[in-house]
């Protein structure tokens, strides 16, 4: 059975830690965290996560810019991205999804159900072909 | 840098006076531009840089609070100072609520006062905007640390609380519940700010009430258990669909539920019921709490209203829940209220329009069969109904489409003479709807008028896409301008019956006039003033003896929305001669004039009016 790999990108160390523990409640989920968009581009290409959980407001390269860069690289272009953000006005959500994000989760989140929310954005497992 | 003032004033004398005052006092750093009606002001604001608006709200095409509302809507970010003859404290207060920064009375203020008012209005407006931005930024900034706090506490409470020694577990529970309350407060403040700034987007669709209520009850189950309260859904099989935004409706039900739970006694019960009426669905939430104190009843929907501040704070409320409910229900074209429940407690109710009812309203079945049929693409039901009513009075039938999809379906089924498009629709924007309509061969040249709630949105898109839009109107819609725009192309104006304003108490005259044109009869000067705001008239028939001889006072106000004088046939008991100017070439003495000769005069006056007023430059 393959693990679910979640790459978390957030410039706030406390939030990285809380998200990491929250996702860790789900034993199938493995988490890796980055503090910046630039680090995330490298980690995404190396680690091929199942999904990237991306903060919006970050210094230097913000969430939308990181997403655009991920899409430019063939190795990371296909990875689903979900924004985790405090900015969840309807027009902002519309903007994020128009950029190609799979979804938006709002901060603050419920730590007990975060893993289930994240799972709901994963693509369905590939159909096993009978021999 | 000089300050650009836009003066909206239709009295040339006052304009001259203001200009002289400004010049005499060396107000060199001000540049005064003058327009004499609201349509011209809206046009000017769309095309020029203006720093501040000075408005006399007695204009030919907009009056009173309506004028203030329109000026504010046309330029929501500009400071607005009202300059009026009307010395009325309550009007002044309402004016400020409608977005004006100051309210000055003509004749009571000299130029230094005006200049000072302009200066302070600008500063107040700047502070207001600063406050809005501050609220928004702070709310977002608060969420980041709150995410860490609620997240950490949530993890402890969710996993390890059972293993902690008792006092510590209790203290952590307090910290956890209060951190969640702080999050709710931030959310509520953001919501209120969003609603008031008109930024809350409503996506209307068909919503099944029962599952939505069940979802809200489920979501509040833990909360209710915390208070030892049971929530029961009555009439669980009532099938009722309303037209609403499901997320916002969920917010309404959740707020009412959490309110009822908080004020219930331990082991109490909250009963939610759904009833289906003919046009409306009624949702009630009943608690068995202490009831609402009499003094507090009028304040219940106010912001930060709490009957007993200390008590409510203990209940974990923010004081914003019910005012959010009220604001949302208003926007859903619904109604919210409350009453003492028999046997103690309170019952809140929310009424929302049934889906079937709203859907059946889409086709205008009450218009005259020969009426010119328009399609109005608008998702706000109240706006749509108001516009239909107004358009019906000038001979149009108006069908509704509440979404882009519906608009395309209707347009394919019926050939409309013209289409009105709200720029913001639930399933797409008006601009893309216009693009798709223009792709249909039968709508390539159909007149399209844009009706916009946000003056800045989409305008450049429409312009650059060369979509051949007839006119662009901001909400609230200037009906006269809309009718003029439509008349130009629909050819309606040329054949219509003349509209006559009849200010008199004599029913015989009213009957006779109704053979000539569409007559609106009013019995007082005040009513006449109100009626003049509802649309243009071709002629007025006026008994000057009305209101203790105050009839002549009305004469200067008899103007249409373009500011043109409305011809008047004056009627007076004693034949007092008012035949003094172009407006009143003849006055008839009531006692000496037969109905027939009055009608002959009326026909003459109508025959001499301009044949095609719609050709005039707006």
Image: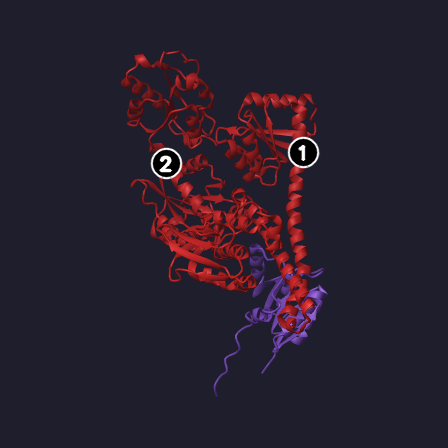
B365 vs B113: above or below: below
Which of the two residues, B179 or B199, is positioned nearer the viewer here?
A: B179
Percent x, y for residue B233?
44, 61
Disc 1 is placed on an element classified as helix
**Does any portion of residue B613 appear in the rendered image?**
yes
Colour of chain B in the rendered structure image: red
Chain A, hue in figure: purple
Depth check: give the residue in front, B127 or B327: B327
Q: Is residue A41 left or right of residue B90?
A: right
Residue under pointer 2: B393
Q: Nearer the viewer, residue B30 or B493?
A: B30
Q: Residue furthest front?
A: B343
> Mark on residue B614?
none
Task: Categorize mark 1 by other alpha carbons within 10 Å: few (<14), some (14-19), many (20+).
Answer: some
Colouring of the image: by chain
Callout 2 secondary element: helix
Between marks 2 and 1 in the image, the one whose residue lies nearer the viewer? 1
Q: Is residue B582 in sight in this rendering?
A: no
Instruction: Please determine whether, in this image, residue B257 is positioned above or below residue B58.
Output: below
Q: Position of residue B332 (x, y in %)?
A: 46, 50
Q: Position of residue B577 (x, y in %)?
A: 40, 11
Quarter-of-image position of residue B262 = bottom right
Residue at image mark 1: B120
Residue ID at (65%, 30%) = B117
Please provide percent x and percent y for residue B291: 51, 50
* Label whose residue precedes the other's in the sequence (2 or 1): 1
Q: Mark 2 belongs to which subunit?
A: B
């Amino acid at each position: 059975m393959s693990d679910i790999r979640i790459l978390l990108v957030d410039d706030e160390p406390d939030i990285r830690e809380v998200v990491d523990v929250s996702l860790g409640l789900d034993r199938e989920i493995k988490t890796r965290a980055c503090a910046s968009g630039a680090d995330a581009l490298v980690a995404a290409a190396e680690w091929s996560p199942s999904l990237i959980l991306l903060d919006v407001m970050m210094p230097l390269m913000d969430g939308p810019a990181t997403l655009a860069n991920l899409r430019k690289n063939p190795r990371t272009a296909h990875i689903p991205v979900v924004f985790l953000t405090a900015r969840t006005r309807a027009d902002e959500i519309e903007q994020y999804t128009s950029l190609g994000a799979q979804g938006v989760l709002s901060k603050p989140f419920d730590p007990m159900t975060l893993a289930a929310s994240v799972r709901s954005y994963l693509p369905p497992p590939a159909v096993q072909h009978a021999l | 840098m000089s300050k650009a003032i836009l003066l909206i004033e239709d009295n040339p004398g006052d304009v001259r006076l203001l200009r002289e005052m400004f010049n005499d006092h060396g107000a060199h750093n001000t540049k005064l531009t003058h327009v004499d009606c609201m349509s011209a002001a809206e046009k000017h604001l769309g095309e020029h840089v203006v720093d501040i608006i000075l408005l006399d709200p007695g204009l030919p095409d907009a009056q009173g609070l309506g004028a203030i509302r329109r000026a504010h809507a046309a330029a929501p970010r500009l400071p607005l100072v009202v300059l009026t003859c009307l010395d009325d404290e309550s009007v002044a207060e309402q004016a400020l609520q409608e977005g004006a920064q100051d309210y000055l009375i003509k004749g009571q203020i000299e130029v230094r006062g005006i200049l000072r008012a302009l200066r302070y209005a600008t500063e107040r407006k700047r502070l207001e905007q600063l406050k809005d931005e501050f609220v928004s930024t702070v709310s977002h900034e608060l969420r980041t640390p709150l995410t860490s706090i609620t997240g950490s506490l949530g993890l402890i409470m969710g996993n390890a609380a059972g293993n902690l020694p008792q006092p510590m577990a209790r203290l952590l529970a307090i910290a956890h519940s209060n951190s969640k309350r702080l999050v709710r407060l931030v959310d509520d403040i953001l919501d209120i700010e969003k609603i008031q700034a008109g930024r809350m987007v409503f996506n209307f669709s068909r919503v099944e009430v029962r599952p939505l209520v069940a979802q809200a009850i489920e979501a509040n189950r833990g909360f209710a258990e915390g208070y030892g309260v049971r929530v029961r859904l009555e009439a669980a099989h009532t099938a009722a669909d309303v037209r609403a935004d499901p997320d916002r409706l969920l917010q309404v039900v959740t707020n009412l539920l959490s309110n009822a739970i908080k004020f219930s006694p331990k082991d109490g019960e909250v009963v939610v019921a759904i009833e289906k009426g003919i046009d409306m669905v009624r949702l009630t939430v009943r608690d068995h709490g202490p009831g609402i104190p009499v003094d507090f009843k009028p304040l219940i929907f106010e912001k930060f209203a709490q009957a007993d501040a200390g008590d409510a704070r203990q209940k974990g409320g923010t004081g914003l829940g019910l005012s959010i409910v009220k604001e949302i229900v208003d926007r859903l074209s619904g109604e919210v209220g409350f009453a003492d429940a028999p046997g103690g407690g309170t019952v809140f109710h929310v009424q929302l329009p049934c889906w079937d009812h709203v859907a059946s309203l889409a086709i205008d079945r009450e218009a005259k069969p020969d009426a010119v049929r328009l399609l109005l693409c608008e998702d706000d039901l109240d706006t749509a109904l108001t516009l239909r009513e107004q358009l019906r009075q000038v001979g149009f039938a108006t069908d509704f489409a509440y979404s882009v999809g519906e608009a395309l379906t209707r347009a394919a089924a019926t050939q409309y003479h013209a289409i009105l498009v709200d720029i913001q629709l639930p399933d797409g924007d008006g601009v893309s709807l216009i693009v798709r309509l223009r792709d249909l061969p039968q709508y390539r040249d159909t007149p399209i008028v844009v009706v916009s709630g946000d003056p800045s949105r989409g305008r450049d898109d429409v312009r650059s896409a060369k979509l051949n839009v007839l006119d662009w109107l901001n909400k609230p819609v200037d009906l006269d301008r809309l009718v003029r725009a439509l008349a130009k192309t629909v050819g309606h104006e040329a054949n219509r019956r003349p509209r006559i304003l009849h200010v008199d108490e004599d029913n015989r005259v009213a009957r006779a006039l109704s053979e000539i044109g569409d007559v609106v009869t009013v019995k007082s000067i005040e009513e006449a003033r109100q009626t003049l705001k509802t649309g243009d008239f071709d002629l007025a028939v006026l008994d000057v003896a009305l209101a203790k001889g105050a009839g002549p006072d009305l004469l200067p106000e008899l103007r249409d929305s373009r500011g043109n004088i409305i011809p008047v046939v004056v009627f007076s008991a004693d034949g007092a001669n008012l035949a003094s100017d172009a407006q009143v070439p003849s006055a008839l003495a009531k006692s000496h004039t037969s109905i027939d000769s009055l009608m002959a005069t009326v026909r003459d006056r109508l025959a001499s009016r301009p044949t095609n007023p719609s050709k005039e430059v707006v």
